[in-house]
């Protein structure tokens, strides 16, 4: 017997990430090959964006996905988020060449306040929210604060792209299969200050840190490469990462909904004070997931170098939070 369809809202649906994301959601890559979905797609009311959305919908129809149980186009979050079980908040203004995420803070704060309020008013009470639009952690914080009637732990930000980038760099450095790397995590903000941490990582049970054994490579090659990967892609493509970002969003939601079977992944989630991160800061943490819930991996030792990195990314996030305080 087939399952009841779930509602998946995606904002910025006619954008680059949307184009790489929707077809995979509809194919079952996100929620499983037995889970029908209804797509509730939100774009700005602008005629060009709505027309582009119509085109994307025509293409979705032409794929004849067996799991696609419905498609809706919206220009108002109050209708787009109605009863939604999953919300992928992608729509935002992307960073162009030479711009920093902080430049986008104020413009995006408005978007995420309105969308948080709409989720609060009309979404399923169990809605799982993933914020992709930058600055993702702070946008997730804003949406969470604007939705006081929904569980705060249901608001998450995407650190999975950083996690996947880190895994790929380590696999290349060690000459191992990326899928064999376990217990990797990325702490903090989705920005160049994030701290990708392979101290606990293993490949087939063996320590990655011991195998690499090169703190200079860690501090001066690995961390800057992962941290500035977004900017490197913008410089090369003239556009921000899209397919890899969509893939990370699929991974994040898939693992949250369906479980990681004990494997660590990184999610940006509101802190409850773990590792000294103040309550409510949306921070990248190592988690495992089961039954639709995530649990932070606890009691990991934090050495002096790691603490310094964590302090730096936390300070940046707190600065971003201060910058939007007056809007909440
Ligand atoms: P894009 O400009 O191609 O698409 C964004 C779309 O969002 C546009 O179609 C736009 O009309 C729409 N939009 C804007 N405001 C909206 C609103 N209020 N409601 C609904 N739709 C709205 O951009 P993109 O390349 O798809 O990137 C989207 C966002 O994702 C950017 O903020 C980008 O920086 C971010 N991003 C995050 C990560 C991450 O790892 N967290 C990775 C890559 C990109
Ligand atoms: C990325 O990491 O690729 C995105 O967040 C785009 C950016 O602005 O860096």
Image: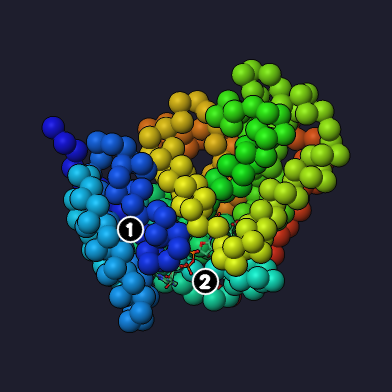
Q: Residue at x 57, y 53 (%)?
A: 282
**Residue that lies at the very extreme toward the bottom in this rendered image:** 47
Near mark 1 (Cα within 10 A), the count class, few <14, some 14-19 or many ≥20, is many
Counting from the top left corner in percent of width and height, residue 235 is at 66, 64
Would you say the beta carbon of the disc 2 residue lies within 8 angstroms of ligand 1? yes
Percent across and percent down for residue 318 are: 67, 60
Q: Residue furthest right?
A: 216
The disc at residue 93 is 2
Q: Residue furthest left?
A: 1
Q: Quadrant of residue 55?
A: bottom left
Nearer-N-terminus badge (1/2):
1
Label 1 SS: strand
Figure quadrant, ligand 2: bottom right
Q: Is residue 327 left or right of residue 319?
A: left
State how far apart marks 1 and 2 are (Cα).
18 Å
User: Measuring 29% from the left and 49% from the top, which residue is drawn there?
Assistant: 26
Residue shown at the point (42%, 55%) measured from the top left: 20
In this image, 211 relative to 267: left or right? right
């Amino acid at each position: 017997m087939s399952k009841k369809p779930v509602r998946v809202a995606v904002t910025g649906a006619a954008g680059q990430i949307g184009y790489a994301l929707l077809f995979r959601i509809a194919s079952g890559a996100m929620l499983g090959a037995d889970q029908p979905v209804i797509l509730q797609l939100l774009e700005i009311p602008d005629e060009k964006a709505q027309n582009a959305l119509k085109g994307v919908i025509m293409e979705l129809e032409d794929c004849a996905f067996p799991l696609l149980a419905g498609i809706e186009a919206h220009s108002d979050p109050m209708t787009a988020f109605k009863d939604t079980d999953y919300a992928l908040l992608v729509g935002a203004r992307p960073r162009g060449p030479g711009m920093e995420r902080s430049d986008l803070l104020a413009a995006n704060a408005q978007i995420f306040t309105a969308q948080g309020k709409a989720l609060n008013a009309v979404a399923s009470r169990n809605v799982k929210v993933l914020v992709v639009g930058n600055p993702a952690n702070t946008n997730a914080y804003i949406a969470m604060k604007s939705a006081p009637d929904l569980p705060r732990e249901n608001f998450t930000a995407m650190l999975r792209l950083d996690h996947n980038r880190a895994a790929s760099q380590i696999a290349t450095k060690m000459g191992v299969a990326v899928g064999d790397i376990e217990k990797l995590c990325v702490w903090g903000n989705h920005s160049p200050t994030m701290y990708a941490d392979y101290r606990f990582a293993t490949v087939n049970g063996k320590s990655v840190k011991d195998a690499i054994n090169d703190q200079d490579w860690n501090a001066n090659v690995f961390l800057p490469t992962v941290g500035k990967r977004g900017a490197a892609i913008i410089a090369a493509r003239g556009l921000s990462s899209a397919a890899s970002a969509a893939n990370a969003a699929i991974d994040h939601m898939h693992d949250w909904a369906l479980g990681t079977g004990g494997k660590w992944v990184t999610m940006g989630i509101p802190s409850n004070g773990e590792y000294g991160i103040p309550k409510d800061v949306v921070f990248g943490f190592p988690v495992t997931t089961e039954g639709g819930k995530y649990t932070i991996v606890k009691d990991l030792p934090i050495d002096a170098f790691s603490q310094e990195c964590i302090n730096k990314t936390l300070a940046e996030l707190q600065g971003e939070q201060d910058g939007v305080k007056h809007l909440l």
